[in-house]
Image (cartoon, coloured by chain):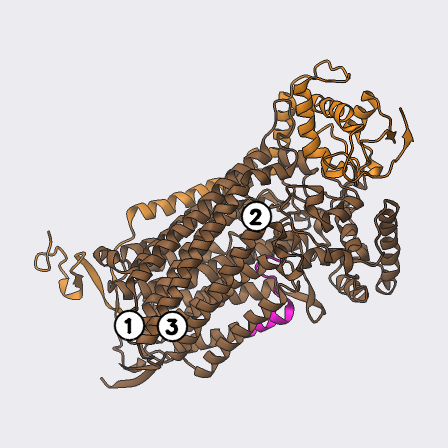
Chain colours: A orange, B brown
Amino acid sequence: MTTLDNHPDKKLEEYEIDTLTNKRLLKDHEYDGIRELDNDLPGWWKWLFIITIVFSIFYLVRLWVFRADDLIQAKEFDKEMAGAQASKPPVAEFQISLLTDAVSMASGKETWTKICAVCHLVDGGGLVGPNMTDNYWIHGNTVEDMFAIVTNGVIEKGMIPYKDQLSPKQRLEVVSYIINEIVGSTPATPKEPQGELIN
Amino acid sequence: MELQKFTYENRITRLFMNATILWGIVGMLVGLIIALELIFPHMSQNIPWLSFGRLRPLHTNAVIFAFVGNGMFAGIYYSTPRLLKTPMFSELLGKIHFWGWQLIIVAAAITLPLGYTVGKEYAELEWPIDIAIALIWVVFGINLIMTTIKRRTKHIYVAIWFYIATFVTVAVLHIVNSIAIPVSFLKSYPVYAGIQDALVQWWYGHNAVAFFLTTPYLGLMYYFVPKAANRPIYSYKLSIIHFWALIFLYIWAGPHHLLYSALPDWAQALGVVFSVMLIAPSWGGMINGLLTLRGAWDKVRESPVLKMFVVGITAYGMATFEGPMLSLKSVNAISHFTDWTIAHVHIGALGWNGMITFGMLYWMFPKLYNTKLFSVKLANAHFWLATTGMLFFAIPLYFAGFTQSLMWKQFTEEGYLAYPNFIETVVQILPMYYIRAFGGALYITGVILMIYNLIKTAGIGKFVSSEDDEAPALHTHKHEVDKGHRIIEGKPVLFTILTLVAILIGGIVEFVPMFMVKSNVPTIASVQPYTPLELQGRDIYLREGCYVCHSQMIRPFRSEVERYGEYSKAGEAVYDHPFQYGSKRTGPDLAREGVKGGPIYKPDSWHYNHFLDPQKMVAQSIMPPYPWLITRDLDISSTPKKIRVMQSLGVPYPEGYAEKANDDLLKQANQIAQGLRDGGIEVEDTKEVIALIAYIQRLGTDIKKTE
């Protein structure tokens, strides 16, 4: 261990030594009793700084000079969308006919609660959207009619198309759920009938 | 060498310390209230000024400008005279500074809950208060700079460098970002719009973190850590390098708040690289703080002050590593708009600012009362409450942010969004919100212990209102020639000017092209100014603080385009004074809420019912109700003035339109209200809700007109 007496620094008289860490204190650096050591920048710190600067130069050159696709967000987006299109499974043959099995009903109910109830209420009594429990229909009451409404919406009335948000299977399940479970039930606060009576 | 006698005035320090404690507890309690409001949306009891959107700005402003602000001034007024061996330049300026700042805080605490807001985050205060802030800040600056000129030490210490940088930069940031044209006494429109406003705002917002929460506290660290540990600063060289690197680089990094937004790629890239380059300069501060304790770790074990400093500095190191990581586009794509950001900033606020403030108070109080701390045990308990409180706060939010983001982005095998209804992703993370509130409560409990402990300390001691000291006059110092950095350390005015130059460069390089080069904000011909009713509705949107929970910026990702519609373009917001991109999605993005047939469109009647009672429409919603929108009449007397101010800002309403605007407003209001009445909703044309619905239904629609 070095001590004051055998410290390697020759100009010892210019410095004082901090006895706890055995490092040089700077002369005349004293502010309200606070002294400063003459330690060098830690090596790893210097390298960290240099590496981040080099990274930054590379990054900017890649964008500004080489116009790298992954740094241009419009291109990045197009690539993501193209990739999603390519990986979409082929549309399977699909038949629109009323489902009744328990699994489909459970799944239909889930979609109903999460999505449809926001406007038609959970019990189907209607609020913003029409009452789904009565036998009055604005756009028809067959499975095909209702599947088409869920798929394409009725934009002028505020019903949005769900073709991009629900799969055909989910749409059929929820339509089947409405026909099997909602129609004919007794909601708490039914909205007045809209459309024509179809029995 | 003849010694001059002088005294240090402690009363001003005590005033600022007391204000720190008072506003600290207020700001944190408001934070706890809004944390609970996220769990219990009806907690605000339909009282407008208690609603989340109005209290959240109060929480952020109180913690930043009142708690940390007074904390920094307490430390600066204590350390500056002692470091420069002179009293502060002017006792009167100090008093004006203190009382002016407290009045500003009171004004903020009244106006923000009442809904007077500019609608720009952390810069919400309206123009008369903004002017007061600028004036009081200059008073502080004059007092600081004149004290450095009157000093008796030959050189200024690194703490003072940081204080100077704080004064200079905050002045520039605040003035440039706050420029606005008044509409009335407490209403104004910012001169910038859309993406340009966003760039200025986040240059301000990011550097408020840098120069209000970071540089002054680094200055305090450089004074109080070596004082409390009685150890020399680890490295003077490191001080120099990390100071200049930090202030020069920081100012460029604002665009990292706008990654994947409508900001041009070149500007986003600057935000990324300057954030990455900040790691080392930030860590320079951490190293100089922690390594100063080398040889004194035995003291750290015994002293609650040093323990708090160590945790504070460590939190600073964590936050300043995390910040650059969040600025990488791939990470930001996940973290942005989620609770991850909230966790990140609270590591900074609770850890760095909180712990340094507490440590400083525990050190200064006994000094000013010439006694020992009443109870070291209680202070240790505070330390553990604060540390565990911080962890209970942050860890659940990291988890919540990550979870929710992944849910937003998840697709089913068939290629549909796995969670098309936003509320599912909210319900998933609600348990994390409970734990966060618990963490916050722990943290506040610690602060209450501190208050008790400090009051007791004051009780057992006797206040030392002034302390005598002596030092030789400045001109009697030996005429040794300074070399290198020592030269400017001996010339504080030159130092101040160099600091100003260093912090201006980044802003200028980013702003000039954004404002001068047209291609940076590509024009969209179909984008038109808001109708008078929509404009009034937009002001209600601002007033209620909708932007604190809803973004208006659809990022160019498949998951967002599928959920919300076409991604947002810069040209769409050119009449948005101020921009409303937002920074957090507690609820869904609203940028295309009005697009009929779009994935999140809802009819007028839905919005009406939803404002009245959100849970009626979305049972699990955590949005509070806004019944007052339905009962309150829209103030249309302000319409002509608002149109005229917008015209003066370059919004192309036809000449003389201001006088006719209310005709159009009433016509449009009647149309919307009639539609609602046709659907069985009893509502008058003139209610505020009609204007807000008009605005909501306009959002994102202009771009579709050409198709």
Is residue B530 visible in the rendered structure shown here? no
Relative to B657, does residue B615 appear above or below in the rendering? above
Question: B608 and B594: which one is in front?
Answer: B608
Whether pointer 1 and pointer 3 mark residues with C-beta atoms closer than 8 Å, the reply is no
Question: B207 and B449: which one is in front?
Answer: B449
**How many marks are shown on the rendered structure?**
3
Q: Quadrant of residue A116?
A: top right
Q: Give, as a three-letter code, the residue at label 1.
A: Asp
Residue that label 3 marks: B491
User: Disc 1 and disc 2: Cα gap in Å?
Assistant: 50 Å
Residue that label 1 marks: A32
Q: Give, as a three-letter code, the residue at label 3.
A: Lys
Q: State the residue at coordinates (78%, 62%).
A: B647
Give the label on residue B39, or none.
2
Which chain is home to disc 3? B
User: Disc 1 and disc 3: Cα gap in Å?
Assistant: 19 Å
x, y (%) of residue B127? 64, 68
Q: Residues within 10 Å of mark 3 (few under 14, many from 20)?
A: some
Whether pointer 3 and pointer 2 mark residues with C-beta atoms closer than 8 Å, the reply is no
Looking at the image, residue B510 sits to the left or right of residue B543; the answer is left
User: Disc 3 and disc 2: Cα gap in Å?
Assistant: 55 Å
